Amino acid sequence: KVGTELYRNHDQAFSKMLEKASADRRIRIDMQLGECDEGIRLDLTDEQGISAAVTLPCDKQPADNPERALQQARDQLGKLGNTLFVARKIELVFTHPLFIAASQLNGLRRDGIAALEAARVASYQRPERRIALRDISYPQHRLSYLGNVLNSAAEQFFREHGVERIAPAYEANKEEGEVVLMITKHCIRYSQNLCPKEVPGLKAEPLELKMGKDTFRLRFDCNRCEMQVMGSLKR
């Protein structure tokens, strides 16, 4: 959506790749400069067929050096610098070459590029949002409180995808007795050199975690190398 913030980790190799000339991508445009009733007119058309035009009211003064005037016009119009565009073709259409100051050509070019950018934005059509397929089944047919289904919209989603039994989220205060409060890869047994997998023949004793007045039983899933902190709701 418009306005969404995107984050990317810094990738030095990717950044160096973008610094190469081959990574420079520009939109090719055709430019035509000619006379109009008010003075001179610049037409711009990009490779997608989007067009814009700007005019510069001025006196049509014939150039003393026609060849030099035409070359100056091409040079100034082609200076697209750090814009999104690169000139594919520059066409000059005059009955007689006119004297146009470099500052006038530069201003006409800048106004033309701004008009073309605005035309491109106005012509953009946002693709239609894809509709989620409803015939794809969720891999589980039953969800415990760990599915974190807390509202009717979430419950409807899972039921539409084939889940038959859905327990409310832990925050709904519906769970009775002891439940898993936390699942972590950090294992106290391992950190204390009490892991049966690391110390052959060791008989692991039950462990508890005490925090103030609260005591939590620790449960270990050695096959998955996970520690679970168990507890009960306080009512």
Image (cartoon, rainbow, N blue to C red):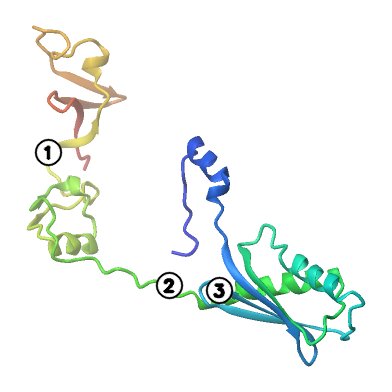
Q: Helix or strand or loop: what does disc 3 sit on? A: helix
On the picture, is 15 further left or further right than 189? right
Whole-percent x, y for residue 62 in the image: 89, 83
Query: First in sequence: mark 2 or mark 1?
Result: 2
Residue at image position (80%, 73%) is: 70
Determine which quarter of the picture holds residue 45: bottom right
- Give the residue at x 15% y 37%: 179
Q: Nearer the viewer, residue 1 or 82?
A: 82
Which is more foreground, mark 2 or mark 3?
3
Disc 2 marks which residue?
126
Q: Which residue type does callout 3 highlight?
A: Arg
Give the quarter of the image for residue 99. bottom right
- The residue under label 2 is which amino acid type? Arg
Q: Any mark on residue 120, and which?
A: 3
For label 1, the residue is 177
- Real-space Cα distance between discs 2 and 3? 12 Å
